[in-house]
Amino acid sequence: MAINYQDRIVITGIGLLTPFGKGVKDNISALFDFKTGINLHQISQNNEELLYLGKITDSLAIDIPKSLSGQYKFLNRGGQIGLYSAIEAMADIDISAIPPEDRAFFLATGDLSNTGCEFMYPANKAALDKDNKIDYKKLNKAGLNKVNPFFLLDSIANNPFSFISSYFEFMGDNTSISSLSPSGALAIELACRSLKQGRSSIALVIGSTTWINPVSLYEMQGLGLLSRCKEGAKSFKPLDRFRDGFIPAEGGASIVLEKEQSAIQRGHKIYGSIVSSSCQCETMSRDTISVPEMITLNAIDGLIKSSQKSIDDFAFICLHGSGSKKGDKSELESVKNIFEKYNTRIPICALKSYTGHMGCASDLFDIIMSLQFLNQNKIPKTLNFEEAERQFINLPITKSIIDTDKSLFISISNGLGNQSVAFIIEKANY
């Protein structure tokens, strides 16, 4: 389903915390310099194995009001990362005249930091006998003082939701989505609906993911999703003929949305606007987690028809680009069919190879970075892309930064469960 927003929805706040570091400024600088946030890291304190990951190494220390300090200690890592990005997004936003009940909040979180049950490791270690086997009587005793009794709170997705809601006093329309891509894009779409339907005056959207703990990595490896990293950090090759999967990362990204006239009246800086959105979900008869072949085509086609734009009006298309053989092929087939249908070609790119795949945070990251480039009349390079497969050899996948005089781009996010969410974004014209 595609929606065209007649009341222009504008982006007035942006914030990032990624493997590149804190803030939009550092991230956009890294992309212009073709840097990567992917490096060799020890995957946990209890596992010395080194893997290529996108890991945040900056401190997450934040000044917390005394009234919330007790709740903050139960915030999981994904919640801390999301909060940090939201603080930057909200830094120049004046909400003093907006009642808390008119402030909407939509959180997408893919925090898998507790899937390895590492909170149990100290108790397990204390319960080992001389033969290195668990003595279960010792384990029961160790559980009383070696296991954090609040581990359950640390794993509940609604805990960071309620904390961040209280921190910014966003007490109106709200939703918390616990998943990976495209849940960040879905959260943006829900926020746009809330504003369009008059249920809120301002909306904060956060996407945060951390899925680089050992159990999550082994599970993704078992599903065949991860790159074998034969070329190190350069192995993440979205859209390239030699792609073999993605490199996972953790990160947080935040966007503040308002209606255009309200934002102008409040004196808020406008980074760009969301022209329309398209959400597609297809059921499949066979057992697979791959994205259906035509779902991206339907998402793009729905956008173009609902917005009444010509595809030649767009500077570029930012694809999901997870680096998987089947997923990227599905996207490229769709784009090829769109170009043939409208008898034109425009540049296409993918950005996840800069930071690593940050799950639902990448949904927002792609929009923020693409918009930052377009506001400087540039189209981003697809990092590590060298050559396409034979059937896609004529697709204009970016190998360098390109100049443009156009003001629109399409951003697409796909995910497991046969979902695709796409947006038309327009750069700032103020």
Image (cartoon, rainbow, N blue to C red):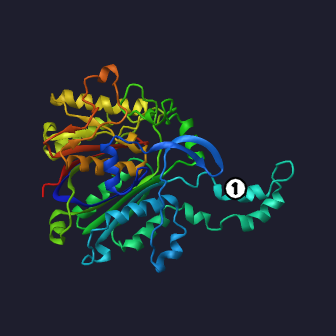
Q: Position of residue 186 (x, y in %)?
A: 34, 52
Q: Reply above or below: 291 against 261.
A: above
Q: How many marks?
A: 1
Q: Position of residue 72 (x, y in %)?
A: 51, 70
Residue 173 in sight here: yes
Q: Residue at x 42, y 29 (%)?
A: 243
Q: Secondary structure at mark 1?
A: helix
Q: State which quadrant residue 32 falls in.
A: top left
Residue at the extreme front of the image, as rendered: 33
Q: Position of residue 116 (x, y in %)?
A: 62, 51
Residue at the extreme bottom of the image, as rendered: 67
Is residue 92 or residue 118 the one in the foreground?
Answer: 92
Residue 253 in sight here: no
Q: Residue at x 30, y 70 (%)?
A: 103
Callout 1 amino acid: Tyr
Q: Residues within 10 Å of mark 1 (few under 14, many from 20)?
A: some
> Would residue 136 appear left or right of 410 to someone viewing this image?
right
Q: Residue at x 31, y 21 (%)?
A: 391
Residue at numbered disc 1:
121
Residue at the extreme top of the image, as rendered: 390
Q: Residue at x 24, y 78 (%)?
A: 97
For the C terminus, the image quarter is bottom left
Residue at the extreme right of the image, as rendered: 130
Q: Reply above or below: 199 against 309.
A: below
Q: State which quadrant residue 104 falls in.
A: bottom left
Q: Reply above or below: 363 against 390.
A: below
Is residue 343 or residue 267 the one in the foreground?
Answer: 267
Q: Position of residue 144 (x, y in %)?
A: 74, 68
